[in-house]
Amino acid sequence: MNLANVNDLERSALLVLSDGRSFGGLARGIGSRVTGEVVFSTSMTGYQEALTDPSFAGQILTMTFPLQGNYGITDEADESERVQVEGFVVRELTDLPSHGSSVMSLNEYLTNNNILAMTGVDTRSLTRHLRSSGVLMGTITTDENLEEALFRLGSAPDYAAADHVKSVSAPLLYEFNKKDFAPGDPILGEGNNPHVVVLDLGVKQNIMRLLQSRGCRVTVVPHITLPTDILSLRPDGVLLSPGPGDPELLGDVTRSVTELVGKIPMLGICLGHQVLAKVFGAKTYKMKFGHRGANHPVIDTVSGKVHITSQNHGFAVDPDGLGADMQVTQVHLNDDSVEAMSHVTEPIFTLQYHSEASPGPNDTEFVFNEFVQFMSERM
Amino acid sequence: MTGKKLESVLIIGNGPIVIGQAAEFDYAGTQACKAMREEGVRSILVNSNPATIMTDDGVADVTYIEPLTVEVLTRIIERERPDAILPTLGGQTGLNLGMELSEAGILKKYDVEMLGSSVETIRFAEDREAFKKLLEDLDEPTPLSRIVENWDDAILAKELIGLPAVIRPAYTLGGSGGGVARTDEDYAAIVRSGLDASPINQVLVEQSLLGWKELEYEVMRDGNDTCITICNMENLDPMGVHTGDSIVVAPSQTLTDREYQMLRNSAFKIIRALGIKGGCNVQFALAPRSLVEDEELVPPRSLPQYHVIEVNPRVSRSSALASKATGYPIARVAAKIALGRDLHEIENAVTQRTTAAFEPALDYTVVKIPRWPFDKFATGDRQLGTQMKATGEVMAIARTFEEALQKAIRSLEVGGRSALWERTSWLDEPYLQATDERIWALLSALRHHLNSTELSARTGIDPWFLDRLGRIVSMERVLLSSDLTPILLREAKRLGFADVDIASLAGKLPEQIRNMRLDWDVRPVYKMVDTCAAEFDAVTPYFYSTYDDENEAIPEMNERMLVLGSGPIRIGQGIEFDYCSVRAAQALRAAGVDAVMANSNPETVSTDFDTSDRLYFEPLDEEGIRDLLDNEANGDRAPASIVQFGGQTAINMAGPLHRAALPIAGSSAATIDLAEDRGLFGEILNRLDIPQPPGTIATDLEEALQAGDVIGYPVLVRPSYVLGGRAMEIVQNANEMVTFFTAALEAGVDAGTNNVLIDKFLEGPEVEVDAVCDGEIVLIPGIMEHVERAGVHSGDSVAVYPPQSLEQPQIDSIVDYTTRMALELGVKGLMNVQFVIAEEADPHGTGVFVIEVNPRSSRTVPFISKVTNIPLVNLAVNIMLGKTLTEQGFSGGLHPSMNLVAIKAPVFSMNKLTNVDTFLGPEMKSTGEVMGIDKSFAPAMRKALIASSMNILPKTPFLLSISNQTKSEATSLIRYLHESGSPLFATEGTAGLITALGIPVTIISKRLDDADKNVVELIKDGAVGAVINTLEGGRTEVRRDGFFIRRAATEMRIPCFTSLDTARVAVQAIDEDPEGSYSVLPISAYRSEDYD
């Protein structure tokens, strides 16, 4: 590092939170101002996967692990077509990545994707603040003082009020068939290929990859797709994907899914899980600072077995009001929040956590096997 | 919870500290006892090591300090009838004993359950063939390998695998006896030594993965099959260097998420297949980038190749490191799992609101650097390989790798070497060997010769690490060439530069840099280790310094004191000082004063966050301590520092603290200085009319030679202010003076002094006391008599309590001198005094001379405290808090002798260190100690010998090679050996003596080129069961001559006595008690004379 360069070429930046708290650092990536809900993730690996996770749309993401960019950017770790976060805040962003499959540095990647980032921030201090204040709207700025930024932030639309799904969902139906992905063992044997329709609320590629590697044919449809159109694709199962934002805003999607109940096996993940909870009468609520990380323990209320899961959500299901035919099967060990549900008679089940991992532990990948099994039983 | 409720559990400790098994198991055992208590289970503990916290009263419910043998454990099981044993917290020693007890049918006979790992699991992980088969069944990759049990196998294995190949002996500590063979000759030598080293004569010959990345995962599993990863760690040194000798970083820095998860999945698969309930360590090799790039047919999203290298189905050194690196108490949780709890039923002691079923998230970087003993063993082979050589380690935590690394280097305390240190020979060409000096050599290479890419290509170290070192080197250049500004200074501190380094680069004094920093408000903040990356509000006060914005360690308002720990375990400064530090913290808390602990050693009990009210994991140097005291002072008066308990590391801080006007508890800096300043101290003794050997200080060779003539040879030569008798020599004549004075001067200069002490060497029994003084009265809990005469370092001597040969007037002199010295010096707290009982005349006619005084806790404090039940450390701490001994219920003088005999015996790690001579001399060599205690001398000695692996069997054949100087003295011992039925072998000269005594002897050639039958062959053939080899006083030809004899004995693990004194008591102990009719009782029973 040449210090002279640091001082001359680096722009200083300010992260301003809506409660007036601010954090100094240096600007990286590209751009001069971004605004979003500021959230933290405690995952120690997988920055590229996180950056491209559509569930982070509308948010400024800070990583609690201080060293980011160590292994650069690979061609294999994107979870969607672009970087989805509004901004990225880290303690240290390295320009000297080291990995056999790295194609560029994290900073180049952010720049190519038009993302403004900040480095040199006391991210632990920021995290401590967010955990007590709850997540807040915030802005990264490179050309304003605190008062100016705060004033501008005052008139910025609130994260929770915006329909972020609309901005991340696929515009058109497509078949997912990645040739670059080494197929796994189709668990149902050759020639037995269930057709899964993925309702895209902000889906991660790994969900499709895992389905494909289990021998599934995968069609991805926009979130506004009508139930009749979904059924006309003659799917063997429907997967309601994860995605960003407040599920209460997804009235149309909820109504569509209601019509699918009883007609087809369904798996809901994260936002998809919340939509299914609403379908069965539950409400959702905004959490103080959410669950974002790769170390979240959930316990199966029947077997007592604990899984370590990857999570990324700021809203959760309030089980009050949930119909008797939909049962909570797993809860979070730390706060008892709902982590999974299962329908008593229909082949419908849901997960709040990301069984597709990427990033994070894939201890619950078996869920996809179960889903395929469900579908095969109906084929 | 599952299974039946257990009522009592026997926990097996790990015995003495040896290379490969250090303080981490004291930490594990102590935590396990705590966990047992929380679960309402009666804990029974056995360990032979008295210097441990775990063997302290009140830790376990019943404590045995007895040798760790099947016989002793069987007797304990008979007596206590435990429901279960827990062998997985006592290192390899515990695991092996658990196996032996099972195989001997003892567990079955007494219906004792094995907790933690089953016998089958241990066998799987330890028996290479079974393990390999298991991994194949799991479809987990392992390197090509072959089990070898004899030389014919070895030839086949070489054909299959090729060279280079790694040789790993089965069932040995720290991989002893193994190595990497690159040539046919290496191969033959290492296979042979490996077969010898293995108790089952089995080695694994394995495909070499030199240059692959090495990673470790610490995983846990409970009875409900929940698996979690506590921590993964990445070695800076690629495969080829033992992980215990590698610089280790946590968490991994260069793995992608997919790689991280791939190895995590593999670790889970293995722990599940092994059925482990508790902790497990899995080591992996991951193909480096060059291999990945070479592979043309890599399909997209494929993952690099890896191999499973090793699995330890138990708590280990790495798990202690992982516990301290994350805040997750692995041993405590493992103990609870062993008792049947599931992870989600165990509270997370850090957050106290979540459970143990989660994976710690780190928001900092941890760097561990091993501490090697080559400052003491200059002739030792420094090359690092598969045989671990480090005695201890340091850990540092910071927000960046660079800062953590530089803090870790500061913590090492290797002759004041900062990251800037380099050898002049490295300036001509880069030095790239893997040795203990590698980290400095890498920095030097980047400074003068190579860029990080070139260096990576030549060392196999991942460029990420070398780029980081490159950033340090770039900053050095900036500091050399630029004026300091607040921004530059802050950047340098954020890269971990110490004030002393910035000072030397910027051409200033360290104190100037410090003042500049404070003026510019460039100060460290303290952040918490909380297991959860700040996601939850944690309650555990475990902090590290870093240069960032927010300080979390806001001082408590309670009265508090700082306990300075002892840093890394090294020869001369072992676990004893951690014992003292922990006891000091406990004493403070018992007195209602908050204990603040500072230490840099991740293995220890003192760095357990439960031990103190606040823990600072910091380098124990002036900058580290003053910064944290500034933080504790919070603009007000800093709390007092206790410097008496952390060995030389802590006592060395007295001066800097005093100069900075920071308060010291107990004996003042002036007192400490008085005792260490040879001239002033000599004057005091003269004034008190207390005899000491005549001596002087020399600063150059001329003075030294003059002193030798005036005082008269032999003289003892040593630099002042150095540890463990480093560079101390007994000098017989002027020729030797030239050699050894120079060496002592060099060692002294390294430690910051050019004063060399030259004293008359008085030969005679050595005696040692620890005393505690409140300024008014002096209490001496007991006197320890050394078996070896003066000349053998006290730390390497066998010490006996109470003394067996002293007469009352001598005891009176010892008590009188100790008392008067303590009062005169103004000691407030502990003091250790060493005496020699010499033939020389002295004014008091008792022959008692003072040879050394240390106004601090010594390595015998835990031993004497446990034997006499006098809590020395607590008494000293209470004195610091203003309570007199009388107020604490004690009176002055020598405490009445207990009706028992306790013997402390040293333990060496010589078989781990090639080319190191094993003879005993004034420089300390042992790494650990054991205790034998019984109602009388012979059984106590017998147990001490058994526990220190120096036991000899009745009538065992002896090899004798006796120096001329000691021949006359040896005659009685030779007769004794003969009469007790031992056949004798001897080298030429010694055989002549024996024949002259009319005793039959077999002559053996000392000449190694004598192909027929030389001494080394004799030893290697197992023809003798013990060796007695004495040497001439100086470092003469004789030493070199006997070197091969001593090394051969070490490698064959047979006792080799280099002092006739030790040999005599060892032989007598067997002779007087051939049946081994020693007691096996809890320590409390000996003290209360309850021998039933």
Image (cartoon, coloured by chain):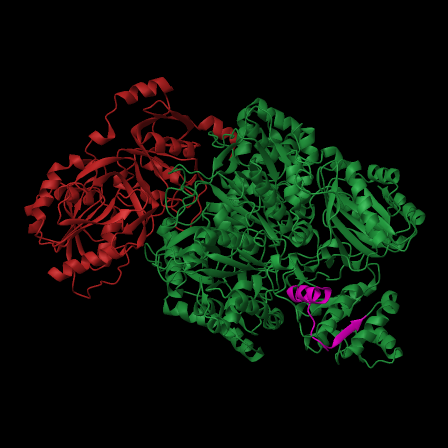
Front residue of B785 and A128:
B785
In this rendering, does residue B484 appear at all?
A: no
Residue B958 is inside the magenta segment: yes
Picture coordinates of residue B267, whole percent (x, y):
40, 59
Query: Toward which corner of the image does residue B501 lie, by quadrant?
Result: top right
Q: Indicate left or right for A284 with B25 as reference.
A: left
Q: Indicate left or right for B106 with B511 as reference.
A: left
Question: Which chain wears red?
Answer: A
Front residue of B638 and A207:
B638
Q: Is residue A3 above or below residue B356?
A: above
Q: Quadrant of the C terminus of chain B?
A: bottom right
Picture coordinates of residue B367, whole percent (x, y):
52, 45
Q: How many labels does the image show?
A: 0
Query: Which region of the structure is painted magenta?
Result: B936-961
Q: Indicate left or right for B364 with A74 as reference.
A: right
Q: Quadrant of the N terminus of chain B?
A: bottom left
Picture coordinates of residue B323, whole percent (x, y):
48, 49
Query: Toward which corner of the image does residue A367 lie, by quadrant?
Result: bottom left
Q: In this view, does B527 lie above or below B868?
A: above
Q: In this view, does B995 lie above or below B689?
A: below
Picture coordinates of residue A308, whole percent (x, y):
33, 50
Query: Toward which corner of the image does residue B485 lie, by quadrant?
Result: top right
Question: Which chain wears green?
Answer: B
Residue B103 is inside the magenta segment: no
In this rendering, does residue B900 appear at all?
A: yes
Q: Indicate left or right for A116 with B35 as reference.
A: left
Front residue of B330 and B408:
B330
